[in-house]
Every structure is written in structure tokens, then in C-alpha cells.
């Protein structure tokens, strides 16, 4: 009887721990999709500071149109130059999310487009964002983007 009571208590503790782990989860797929949505909106804002604010200071970046942009200053310069293109936007196509707290990965495809109506340029690309949960929210700690192979 004592063994049964002890096993019951252990089972209750285990179930309680599992329930607490589920309710204190650091994020959901919707949270990561929202972080990605902020990046898409910031890209179209025309303000490099909006998009640069989404990156952690330690972030590494391999952008579509530059070898790398691994410091806040280089990232700001990259986005400032990119945002000189009129009507710049990224149109999401696919997005898969994997969360392993405190890190999450968002990977998929988007199409960059810019230019005046009738003379638009489109660049289909693939991406990977690695986010880290911080007191400020989900911050980008790595970003890779490259043109899709033909």
C-alpha cells in the first residue's frame, strides 16, 4: 500500500511538472509568425531603423544582395541602400516554424520586389531567421537570405 501511495505522489508531481512546462512555454508558432510579419512590414516602411531594431546587436546576417552584414552599422547601411528602391516589399510565400526555447527558427520563401509600376524587379528568395526570446521579445540573432536557384 505504501508503495502504491508513493507511486501515486510521484505520478502527480510528474504530471504537475508537465502541466507547468506547457503553460510556461516561451512562445507559439503564431508568435514567430508575428515576429516575421514585423520584419516584412519594417522592410516596406522605408525606415532602416525600423528593421534594424528587430535584430539583436550580436546578430549575424547573410543578406540576398551582400556577402554579410554582421554588425548593426553594416546592417543599417545595407537596409538604407536597399530601401532606396521605390516600392520595396517582401511578399511571403512559405514559412515553416520550429521552436526550441529560447530559440525559434523560421524558414521559407518570399519574393522581393521593387521599382515603378511597369518596370518592377522581382527576386524570388529563400530565407532562414533564427530568433531568440529576450525581455524585449523575439529578436533576430541570425538571418540568411539567398536568391532561389533557377
Image: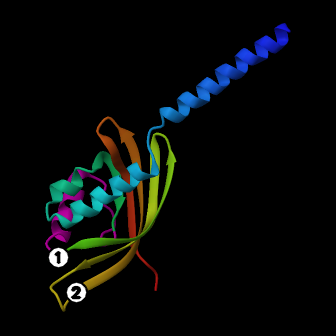
- To which residue does mark 2 refer? 120
Q: Which of 98 and 74 is in front in this view?
A: 98
In the rendering, at what x and y percent does residue 102 appear? 45, 40
Q: Residue 68 carries which label?
A: none
Q: Left or right? Give the position of 60 relative to 99.
A: left
Residue at disc 2, secondary structure: loop
Which residue is rendered at x = 75% and y = 17% of the image?
Answer: 8
- The residue that appears at 32% across and 72% down in the rendered structure is 91
Which percent across, then down, holds residue 67? 33, 67
Q: Relative to the observer, which residue lies in front, 54 or 23?
A: 23
Asked if residue 137 shows in the view, the reply is yes
Q: Which mark is residue 87?
A: 1
Q: Earlier in the sequence, mark 2 or mark 1?
A: 1
Q: Give the answer, above or below, for where 128 lies relative to 101.
A: below
Q: What stretch is highlighted in magenta?
A: 64-84
Q: Determine whether label 2 and label 1 are within 8 Å by CB.
A: yes
Judging from the image, the colouring scheme is: rainbow
Tell me the quadrant of the picture where the N terminus can be found: top right
Residue 74 in sight in this render: no
Task: Categorize mark 2 by other alpha carbons within 10 Å: few (<14), some (14-19), many (20+).
Answer: few
In this view, 70 is above or below 40: above
Magenta stretch holds residue 72: yes
In the current view of this chain or complex, which residue is farthest to the right? Answer: 1
Q: Is residue 5 left or right of residue 123?
A: right
- Pinpoint residue 41: horizontal percent, then vertical percent: 24, 62
How far is the residue under mark 2 from the one under mark 1?
9 Å
Q: In which quarter of the image is residue 109?
A: bottom left
Amino acid at each position: 500500500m505504501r508503495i502504491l501511495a508513493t507511486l501515486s505522489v510521484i505520478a502527480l508531481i510528474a504530471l504537475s511538472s508537465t502541466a507547468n512546462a506547457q503553460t510556461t512555454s516561451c512562445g507559439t508558432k503564431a508568435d514567430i509568425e508575428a515576429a516575421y510579419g514585423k520584419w516584412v512590414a519594417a522592410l516596406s516602411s522605408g525606415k532602416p531603423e525600423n528593421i534594424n531594431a528587430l535584430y539583436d546587436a550580436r546578430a549575424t546576417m547573410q543578406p540576398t544582395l551582400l556577402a554579410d552584414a554582421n554588425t548593426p552599422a553594416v546592417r543599417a547601411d545595407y537596409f538604407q541602400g536597399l530601401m532606396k528602391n521605390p516600392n520595396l516589399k517582401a511578399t511571403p510565400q512559405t514559412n515553416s516554424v520550429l521552436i526550441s526555447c529560447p530559440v525559434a527558427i523560421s524558414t521559407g520563401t518570399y519574393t522581393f520586389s521593387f521599382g515603378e509600376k511597369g518596370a518592377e524587379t522581382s527576386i524570388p528568395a529563400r530565407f532562414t531567421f533564427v530568433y531568440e526570446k529576450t525581455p524585449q521579445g523575439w529578436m533576430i540573432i541570425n538571418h540568411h537570405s539567398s536568391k532561389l536557384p533557377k
